[in-house]
Image (tube, rainbow, N blue to C red):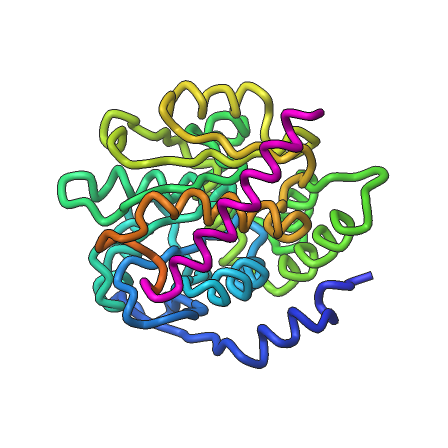
């Protein structure tokens, strides 16, 4: 149990990438926690937004791999925000503090919804250059919890954890997926009552994405074909909302493919970011491009050939 937590990769990550804490609101109890890795000269990095149960380090495998390729990557953990507007305002202040005009966002589940809401919130003065939406949704009503959203703040932590764990896969799983779930359960245990209650409120508060405000942003939709917390209808809705989006399908991966299928997820991220190489919105150090680009194209060509042969 807990293989990831004691793995050499995770321990290397924790010992080499410092966790920063930043306050950008007047309320100094609202603390953003983040890992910022890779070349600081990059002004349009890739930022990871976690799901309800996640902390910033759930993306450690993406941080290790992508910074090795020369990308600048930031993984976040949210402060306690109780509505989407408050979150968007806080996130904008964080980007201002980090002196980042535009960013690429990778959002997982709730993180994907918040990434879309932030792109929508800043559409008149765009701050989002592109979106990678992993197991994401566009309308909170899919969870049928909008009526309870205003009462999460009253519930004790054990009850909130039970609600979140109810969406985790059960039954027989391959070892990597089982390890991924163990790690997420451990991360969930580290969250306090207000952190969990606020995230569940954001996840279920009545809200939906207005696609006409963000239709010009390049999008990759990443999802899995096996069991996850998202219904088929929710996935179809995302495809309808972003008809021009690139699609990155993983045969398996469950709710947390970035943990248990990290090599595939990292490849799809690189393919998404390739379109910005050579522009001011590149998330990679220009001196690293040629080697990285060749490698990605070689891998993607190989995987597409394999796909055709099947």
Task: Kindly identify the residue that appears in the image at 69 percent across and 36 percent down.
Answer: 252
Q: Nearest the camera: 187 or 148?
A: 187
Task: Kindly identify the residue that appears in the image at 14 percent across and 45 percent down.
Answer: 125
The residue at the far right in this view is: 172
Quarter residue 135 falls in: top right
Judge from the rendering whether residue 262 lies leftward or rightward of residue 21; answer left or right: right
Q: Measured from the top left, where is residue 199 in percent x and y?
A: 48, 49
The residue at the far left in this view is: 124
Task: Kindly identify the residue that appears in the image at 52 percent across and 36 percent down.
Answer: 222
Overall secondary structure of the magenta section: helix
Quadrant for the N terminus, please.
bottom right
Q: Measured from the top left, where is residue 59 in percent x and y?
A: 55, 58
Quadrant for the C terminus, please.
top right
Q: Measured from the top left, where is residue 29 in percent x and y?
A: 37, 69
Task: Kindly identify the residue that appears in the image at 71 percent across and 67 percent down.
Answer: 5
Judge from the rendering whether residue 253 lies leftward or rightward of residue 282; answer left or right: right
Residue 192 vertical placement versus 222 (above, below): below
**How many marks do you count on the picture?**
0
Q: Based on the picture, tell me whether residue 125 belongs to the magenta stretch.
A: no
Residue 301 vertical placement versus 262 (above, below): above
Judge from the rendering whether residue 7 lies leftward or rightward of residue 87; answer left or right: right
Magenta span of residues: 286-310
The residue at the far bottom in this view is: 15
Q: Measured from the top left, where is residue 52 in percent x and y?
A: 54, 48
């Amino acid at each position: 149990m807990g293989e990831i937590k004691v793995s050499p990769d995770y321990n290397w990550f924790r010992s080499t990438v410092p966790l920063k804490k930043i306050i950008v609101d007047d309320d100094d109890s609202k603390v953003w926690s983040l890992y910022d890795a890779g070349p600081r000269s990059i002004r349009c990095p890739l930022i990871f937004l976690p799901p309800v149960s996640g902390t910033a380090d759930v993306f450690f495998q993406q941080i290790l791999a992508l910074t090795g390729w020369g990308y600048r990557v930031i993984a976040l953990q949210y402060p306690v925000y109780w509505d989407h507007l408050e979150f968007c305002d806080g996130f904008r202040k964080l980007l201002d503090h980090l002196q980042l005009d535009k960013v690429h966002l990778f959002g997982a589940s709730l993180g994907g919804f918040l990434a879309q809401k932030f792109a929508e919130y800043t559409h008149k003065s765009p701050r989002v250059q592109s979106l990678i939406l992993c197991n994401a949704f566009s309308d909170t009503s899919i969870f049928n919890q909008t009526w309870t959203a205003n009462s999460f703040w009253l519930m004790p932590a054990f009850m909130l954890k039970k609600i979140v764990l109810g969406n985790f896969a059960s039954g027989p799983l391959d070892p990597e997926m089982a390890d991924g779930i163990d790690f997420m359960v451990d991360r969930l245990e580290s969250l306090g009552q207000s952190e969990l209650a606020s995230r569940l409120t954001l996840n279920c508060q009545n809200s939906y994405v207005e696609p006409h405000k963000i239709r010009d942003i390049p999008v990759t939709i990443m999802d899995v074909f096996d069991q996850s917390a998202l219904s088929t209808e929710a996935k179809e809705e995302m495809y309808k909302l972003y008809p021009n989006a690139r699609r990155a399908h993983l045969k398996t991966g469950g709710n947390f493919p970035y943990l248990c299928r990290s090599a595939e997820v990292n490849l799809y991220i690189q393919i998404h970011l390739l379109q910005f190489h050579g522009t001011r919105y590149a998330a990679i150090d220009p001196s690293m491009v040629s080697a990285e680009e060749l490698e990605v194209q070689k891998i993607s060509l190989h995987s597409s050939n394999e796909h055709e042969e099947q």
